């Protein structure tokens, strides 16, 4: 029997009780046990606001600054107490609960090159996922369904970028959107086939030895089955036909096809996370690197894909303002609240539909960052 959420350094008594269909029961003898102390290197958190947040728990993967040989997958309660953790031998990047109910995590369990693992609630490894064709596995997202999964591969090509002030032999980092499906050929959609290096935002350099013009960082399956992909370094969300790989539209950045309406910042910049909501709108975390001044926010847009308009219908900016230069996520909860991970700004905030702050957690150590955070209803 798996028992989760116990307090550390605490004595417990336990017994098992089984009931039969006719109402009779059997009980095991009662036994006692004590839980161990938490590891010394677990991070500390401060709860700044705890005003009737959504019941449940918050999960996150936590990195340790420049330390790459360890990381933690964590689940906290609303008091900021760690109720579940698992340490890995690599940085922990994306950690989320999939529609299957299991968790997936990007890290290394044994010192091997980092990739995705599917684990159960006890932390047991069930499956492993890597990009195909020898490509590096991108750390940013794995979406896992009963009959398919989607992740990023990373490929490199040597390119002559002297026409853009760069080197003759620049090492250019490309993205492969890998959509693996049961009973269907995989879709391997490559930025080298569809994008130009000049699609990069104004602050992305094309002149160094290593050039990263696109940087895919989030994936969602749209209501019509096609793919929504976030490319941070282009300031762009791209909709891709899941069968043919054809680009359906491009939203944001240099190739923007949409008019932004009612948005005082006229769009998003270096965004993270994208989800199509049940109401048809799109929510994402706008890091805001190129806003003046830089400021981060959670935003919800109503898209008209025929008229090509993107109307801002909701946003949240922290008070005082926060700027997360990287990382981040916005999760719309079933009660209408929104959980916002402010990435490198080291805050997790839950707000209600009116923008009232219901929960605010600060990460104490300046070297600890949460790539994403998700609220879950139960540990089971």
Image: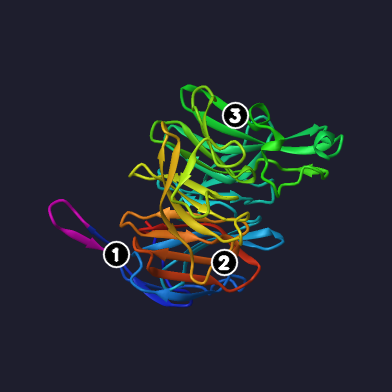
Q: Are marks 3 and 1 in contact (CB under 8 Å)?
A: no
Q: Residues within 10 Å of mark 2 (few under 14, many from 20)?
A: many
The single residue placed furthest to the right in the displayed view is 168
**Residue 282 x, y percent position in the rendering:** 43, 45
Circle 2 SS class: loop
Q: Which residue is at 48% across, 28% downward?
A: 181
Classify residue 355 as left or right of residue 116. Answer: left
Classify residue 94 as left or right of residue 305. Answer: right
Confirm whether the magenta stretch covers residue 183.
Answer: no
**Residue 314 x, y percent position in the rendering:** 40, 55
Magenta extent:
19-27
Instruction: Please give the residue where the numbered disc 2 appears in the rendered image.
Output: 346
Circle 3 SS class: strand
Please say if 194 is above or below 142. Answer: above
How many marks overall? 3
| Of 82 and 375, the residue lying toward us | 375
Circle 1 SS class: loop
Instruction: Please give the residue where the numbered disc 1 appears in the rendered image.
Output: 28
Q: Say which of marks 1 and 2 sits in front.
A: 2
Distance between mark 2 and mark 3 Cα atoms: 33 Å
Q: Quadrant of residue 134?
A: top right
Q: Earlier in the sequence, mark 1 or mark 2?
A: 1
**Residue 281 x, y percent position in the rendering:** 39, 44
Instruction: Please give the residue where the numbered disc 3 appears in the rendered image.
Output: 189
Q: Earlier in the sequence, mark 2 or mark 3?
A: 3
Distance between mark 1 and mark 2 Cα atoms: 46 Å
Q: Say which of marks 3 and 1 sits in front.
A: 3
Confirm whether the magenta stretch covers residue 24.
Answer: yes
């Amino acid at each position: 029997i798996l028992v989760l959420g116990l307090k550390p350094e605490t004595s417990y008594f336990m017994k098992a009780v089984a009931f039969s269909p006719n109402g009779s029961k059997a009980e095991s003898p009662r036994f006692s046990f004590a839980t161990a102390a938490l590891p010394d290197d677990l991070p500390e958190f401060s709860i700044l606001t705890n005003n009737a947040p959504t019941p449940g728990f918050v999960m996150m993967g936590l990195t340790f600054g420049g330390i790459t040989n360890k990381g933690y997958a964590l689940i906290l309660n609303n008091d900021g107490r760690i109720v579940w953790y698992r340490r890995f031998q690599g940085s922990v990047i994306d950690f989320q609960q999939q529609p299957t109910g299991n968790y997936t995590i990007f890290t290394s369990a044994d010192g091997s090159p980092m990739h995705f693992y599917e684990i159960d609630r006890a932390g047991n490894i069930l499956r492993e996922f890597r990009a195909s064709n020898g490509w590096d596995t991108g750390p940013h997202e794995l979406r896992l369904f009963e009959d398919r999964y989607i992740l990023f591969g990373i490929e490199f090509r040597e390119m002559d970028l002297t026409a853009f002030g760069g080197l003759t032999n620049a090492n250019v980092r490309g993205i492969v959107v890998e959509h693996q499906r049961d009973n269907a050929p995989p879709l391997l959609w490559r930025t080298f086939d569809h994008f130009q290096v000049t699609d990069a935002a104004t602050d992305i350099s094309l002149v160094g030895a290593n050039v990263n013009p696109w940087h895919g960082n989030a994936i969602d399956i749209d209501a019509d089955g096609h793919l929504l992909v976030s490319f941070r370094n282009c300031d762009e969300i791209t909709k891709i036909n899941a069968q043919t790989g054809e680009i359906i539209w491009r939203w944001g950045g240099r190739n923007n096809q949409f008019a932004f309406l009612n948005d005082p910042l006229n769009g998003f910049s270096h965004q993270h996370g994208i989800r199509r909501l049940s109401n048809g709108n799109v929510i994402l975390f706008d890091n805001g690197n190129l806003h003046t001044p830089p400021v981060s926010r959670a935003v919800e847009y109503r898209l008209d894909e025929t008229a090509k308009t993107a109307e801002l219908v909701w946003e949240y900016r922290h008070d005082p303002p926060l700027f997360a230069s990287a990382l981040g996520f916005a999760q719309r909860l079933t009660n209408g609240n929104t959980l916002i991970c402010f990435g490198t700004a080291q805050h997790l905030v839950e707000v209600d539909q009116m923008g009232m702050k219901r929960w605010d957690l600060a990460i104490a150590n300046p070297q600890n960052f949460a790539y994403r955070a998700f609220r879950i209803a139960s540990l089971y």
